Image (cartoon, rainbow, N blue to C red):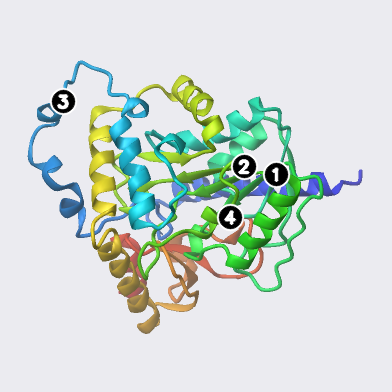
Amino acid sequence: MSTTPADDDREHLFSELAAHDRLGEALIEHPERVFVSDWNGDHPFMEDFLGELGEAPIGKWGSLGTYSRMDEDLGLSDAVAELHVRRYGEPGVTAQRCVTGAGATSFLTTLLMYQYLQGFREISYLPPVYYNAAWWIRRLGLGVRRVATDVDFASNVELDLPDDGGLLWVTDPVWFAGLPVRSATIDRIAEWQGRTGATVIVDGTFQYMGWEGATAEAADRLDPDLTFRLVCPTKTLAMHGFRFAYAVVPEQHSASFTELHKRLHGPAGLADRLFAHRAVEVLGSHSGALPLMDFARLRYRELVDSGAVTEAVKPETGFFLFGRPSVDASEYVAMDASCFGGQGYPGYVRINLLNPAAVGLLTR
C-alpha cells in the first residue's frame, strides 16, 4: 500500500514519540549509564533567583487554605507585559494578551485544544515539535503537514508553506541545539501569514535565553492578531521545581483562551504564583538570566576546548549542546536527532550543560 505525503509527514512527526519510547526503554535497561541529555540540572544561582522566598515557610506569604489563581492575578499580567516592553523591547505585548499559568506543558495542551475548538483539523509544522505537543496532535487526530525538510539550522533547508494558510506550529529556538530559528525564516512566515491570514503557534518555551543577553525575539514580528506564543520563565532561570509559564495571545482571543486554560488545568499553587512574580522581577533586572547563560557558555567552552566533545553545533542560546561526545556511546544514554525530527548528524546527541553527571562523565 502506497503512502501519501500527508501520511509520510504524520509518520515523520510521530517517529519522535517512538524515539522517546526507545529512550525510556534504554534508561530502564541501563540504569548504570549517565543520561547526558537529562532535562534536570543544577547551577549556582538558585538562591539569588529565589530571593527572600527561600527564607521563610511558604505560609508566611499567603493563605494555604485559599485557591491561588494565577490567571486572576492582574498584577502578574501587568508585570509580564512590562517585562516585554521595557526589558525585551516588544511594545506590542499588553497585559490583556498575557495569559499566565502553571507550567509550559499545560499550555501546550491548551494551545492545541483551543485551535481544535476553533475548527482546525490540520496542522503544518517546522521540526522539531516538542514530544508532548506531538502526543496531543496525534490524540486529537489532526492532519499533519511538514513544511520544512529539516530543522532550521541544518544546511539547505527548504520551506514549503501551504498556499491556503491554515495553522502552523513553529518551535523557536530549536532548543536542543541552542539556536534560534533564522530571522529570514521568521520573515518568510510573517509575509506568508500576512498574505494568507494563517494562524501561527510559536512554542517559545526556551526564548529570551540568548548568550549575549535577552532581546526582542524575531517571533514578535509575526501578526499579533494571528499569533499565539508560549514563554516559560522557569525554563529561562532553569528552576524547574516551580511551574510558571504564559501565553501571549491575540487580544480578541484572550478571554476565551483564559477560560479554556482554567477549565483544563484549574488554579496554580501558591508557591508557583509567588515565584512567578519573583521570576518576572529577576528577568526584568539589569542582569536578568545572563549569569546563568554565561555559566552555560563556560561549560560549552570547557567541553569543546578539552576535546570532551569533538564536534558540535555552536549554540547561541539556552543550556543545551548538540554535539558528538568523545567517550564511548556505551557509557551513556542520550537523545539523538531522531528525538527531534532531525536528519543526519550521526553520533550527535543533546547534552545538558547544567547537568553535573553529564559534564563529569564527558570531562573525566
* Kind of element beneath mark 1: loop
- Residue indicated by mark 2: 226
251, 258: nearer the viewer? 251
Between discs 2 and 1, the one toward the N terminus: 1
Say which mark, if any, is on residue 346.
none
* Kind of element beneath mark 3: loop
Say which mark, if any, is on residue 62.
3
Residue 243 visible here: no
- Residue indicated by mark 1: 198
13, 24: nearer the viewer? 13
* Kind of element beneath mark 2: loop
Please state which amino acid type lies under the numbered disc 3: Gly
138, 84: nearer the viewer? 84
Residue 36 visible here: yes
Spatial CA distance of label 1 from label 4 is 24 Å
Spatial CA distance of label 3 from label 1 is 43 Å
Between discs 2 and 3, the one toward the N terminus: 3
Spatial CA distance of label 2 from label 3 is 37 Å
Query: In this rendering, which labeled residue sits more in front, label 2 or label 3?
Result: 2
Query: In this rendering, which labeled residue sits more in front, label 4 or label 3?
Result: 3
Is mark 2 in CB contact (under 8 Å) with mark 1?
Answer: yes
How packed mark 1 is, by other alpha carbons closer than 10 Å (few <14, some 14-19, many 20 or more), is many
Image position, residue 163 (x, y; %): 81, 50
Please state which amino acid type lies under the numbered disc 4: Phe
Q: Quadrant of the C terminus?
A: bottom left
- Residue indicated by mark 4: 340
Between discs 2 and 4, the one toward the N terminus: 2
Q: Is residue 337 above or below residue 261?
A: below
Q: Residue at x 47, y 19 (%)?
A: 263
How packed mark 4 is, by other alpha carbons closer than 10 Å (few <14, some 14-19, many 20 or more), is many
Query: In this rendering, which labeled residue sits more in front, label 2 or label 4?
Result: 2
